[in-house]
Amino acid sequence: MFETIGQSFVFVFTIVALSYFLLVNSTYLTLTGMAIGHLRSRRDLDAYEPVGSFTANDFLPGIAIVVPAYNEEHVIVESVSALRSLEYPFYEIIVVNDGSTDGTREALFEAFELQSIDASYPIDLPCEPIDEIYRSPASDLVLIDKANGGKADALNAGLYFTEQPLYCAIDADSLIERGSLREIVEPFLTEPTKTVATGGSVRIANGVSFAKGKPSTVSLPGNHLVRFQAVEYLRAFFLGRTGLSRIGSLLIISGAFGLFKTSVIREIGGYDTESITEDMELVVRLHRYLIEADRPYEVTFVPHPIVWTEAPSSLDVLSRQRNRWFRGMLGTLLKHRDAIGRPRYGIVGVFGLPMFLIIETIGRLIEGAGYVAIPVFFLAGVLDPVFAIAFLVVAIALGAFVTVLAVTGEVLTYRRYDDPRDIALLLWYSVLESVTYRPWRAFVAWRATLSYVLGDKSWGAMPRTGFGRETKD
Amino acid sequence: MESTILLAWIGAILFIFLTALSLVTVGLSWWTRRQERLEEQDRQHVRDELFEQIDREPQARESWIAGLSDRERAVLTSLVEHYLRLLSGQERARYQELAAELALGARAEADLTADPLGDRLQAIAMLSLLDHPISHDRLEETCVRSQETREAAARLLLERREEFEQPAARATRLLLWEGTEPLSVYGLETLSRLNAGEESPLLDLAAEHVSKWNTAVVSQVCLVIEHTEQLDPGASIDWLFPLLEHSDPELRAAAVGAFTPFGWREDIRNRLDVRSLLADPAPVVRKATYALLTEWGGSLGHELLLRAVRTEPNDRARLAAMRGLHSIEPNVPVSAVEASRSAWIWIHAEQAILEGDALELPEPTGSVA
Amino acid sequence: MSEALSVLLVDDDDDLRELLRFHFERKGYDVRALADGREALEFLRTDNVRPDVIVLDLLMPDIDGREFLRHRRETPELERIPVIVLTGLEDEDILEEVFELGADDYVTKPFSPKALLTRVAHVE
């Protein structure tokens, strides 16, 4: 009797786990394939440049680049300097110093002629109290010095302060290419009345040297963890998001580089300071608000690689980052649970949100259980060989296949990794990913869920050196 | 047992697929990089040859052109296009001559009916840069089916306006079409350039059709009018007035902005009921009115802005009013502005810093606001 | 009739640099073509040769045109060298700013190389 129950359990569990692997990998396979097809067919359209001088166009919208900074003394000057030579005629830079306790302010004062505006801003900004606002007479640079309130709070300070119609949210250590602003604003130029938000494609900066505002040599660093992340970014943050954007289900715009219509974000009340993944929460709330108001809108992903960030190179830091991302996702899904599955919310309600719930969240957890349980069952001899092979096929092989396809997608499109040797390495890591990195991520997901359930809403136990970048090695 | 074997087969096939795909990917990466490098080299020497050849007679160039490989031709085409976008005057004419010898115009004309949208747009753009004869009828035949192609065709008419009859009117019509599809920011710029100068067919077109147009489109038209210099002084803008009472506050605000270039017309100044606009319930409309008053200047502007800084309830609108007042009359004492005291202080503090250097923040035109 | 001038050309557009280099050299000028403000400043600092004219783009990486003009204004020997700004920017505020920063002439793209050569020959 016990045996039959035990056997039934193994059987049911295995079926469920395998179905999930099949579901998750097929979904990503579809999104990836769709994305590649879409990008290839759009190549000529993307290369088209309307006749007329871009920089002389008076109708280009002004952009405020909001840079939230917390203890960024080592990178902030370089970052802001790079931001000053972007190929776009109308923009300003607003650095929001979120109560840094290191030399961030001093570094900025030394590098740029910042002078204090001896007055308080006549408009109430919905954020932690502002100490002082500075500006540089020689350039469009503003520094808002305020009490610590977190990244969301700092972003709110910037977006409520600016008078520009668009604002750009970036991380202090995001490396933006010279042409990036022009790239990310493009949907706002072709569809000015409907576009409300655009997200940029994030690439890994480790092993990339920058010169004159462009990546000059892009190569894979030696670190294994970074290599895994490189393939992961290609699959999830490049092609995955391209696919999702294509079907109107882009729910995350990376905090590393996103462009938004200021007025609409103010309408929805800015960023949620309670959320630890304020970038995702904002976009989901944005979708809901506009759908509920019956306003036609576009949230678009710009697939062209334009922003580079340093990926964690130690397991420690990476797991904290992923832990936070997962808890943040849980938090966002929980907050907006009443929209999940509801046709009222169009494709976002019927596909986008359920996809995050079923595939990214529950799917990750079940995958995690499967990665552990199935081999255990097999070793214990209670697993039907059919299922063992099925596991290898749908979990390992199919997973590897999706990631390999993502690398192919890279070669067929932007080719930032243009050395065939790097491509070969990426392919190898794509296969390895299925048996090492992905199971590990699923394990992190379980830990994150546990901490979430136990009420952990923090950004990470270790001292922060910057927003969500966790301590660097 | 059978299912096991079946699955094993599936696994094997998948594995083979995987390996094959990987090999293809690496091969593709290698091959593409090689192509890129060859093209780079080609570009260098084709460019050098181009400079040598550009001043020669067409007959002298014939053999050079005929001797170009496909890749070299492609590179040359790209270079010619780049220079056509960059140059004007006699030099440009020489490049147009060369383009004719390369049959770029003929190819572009053929591509007007190509399938992919990108190819059609590229073709229209190329024709805009060349002097290859193209009739308005042909444009109407091939370029009117989508907003993007209409915009590109309108640009062509702008760039080559001397060759067409009524280019401004025709191009404006192409851009607005049925007034149901909003223009891109590129289209807005084209529309503005077309209507700057002696004739402004946009105003006449609007007078006739504005009631059929989408609110988004009407707002865009108002924005263009606001930012276009030297509009036709005799054109009628009667149709703008009813827009000031439209139910959509964004449209009302855009309509207010559209009056900006008409401040010199006394009949307009008298007819516009500024005071009722200042009492509009929507802050965005009031803000637009402050901007208008600032542009128009004069004693009326001064008086009304002064009143506004004292009475405007909305923070942002009040700051806008204060900025406007300050730019008309920098010497208003803080005691006069009452409720806008903090705005006055802020503006003066900001100015104190900026005085040291002449830089000012660029004015956004709010084309996506 | 035309003296052999030495021209410093600063523009990040490869093709444009080469085109202008060709035109200037054909007229007998001595040309140095660089890709951004930083390279230009370094060139001007290290070498003793002073160009007779500088043709300057505005939108460039690293140190851009306006930044270059600011540096030039602070250096008397550089201030003596006339600068012709060649740019795609047409904004009237930028025009004002550029002249206030000490530029001697302002040419917008699209431009005529022949007209530019005339301006270079007659500037200052």
Image (cartoon, rainbow, N blue to C red):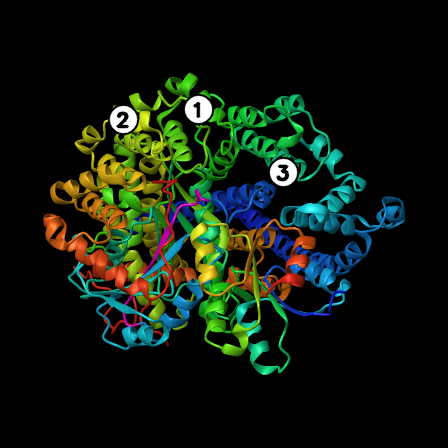
**Badge 1 element:** loop
Amino acid tagged 2:
Asn
Cα separation between marks 1 and 3: 33 Å
User: Residue A14: x and y, percent?
Assistant: 37, 49
Q: B321 or B21, which lies in front?
A: B321
Of all chains, the one bearing label 3 is B
Of all chains, the one bearing label 2 is B
User: Going from the N terminus, do you reach mark 2 or mark 3 first?
Assistant: 3
Asked if the stretch drawn in magenta spans residue B133, the answer is: no
**Magenta segment, which residues?**
A58-71
User: Residue C113: x and y, percent?
Assistant: 68, 54
Please tell me the numbered disc located at residue B270.
2
Q: A318 or A55, which lies in front?
A: A55
Amino acid tagged 3:
Ala
B272 shown above or below A432: above
Indicate which label's residue lies in the foreground, 2 or 3: 2
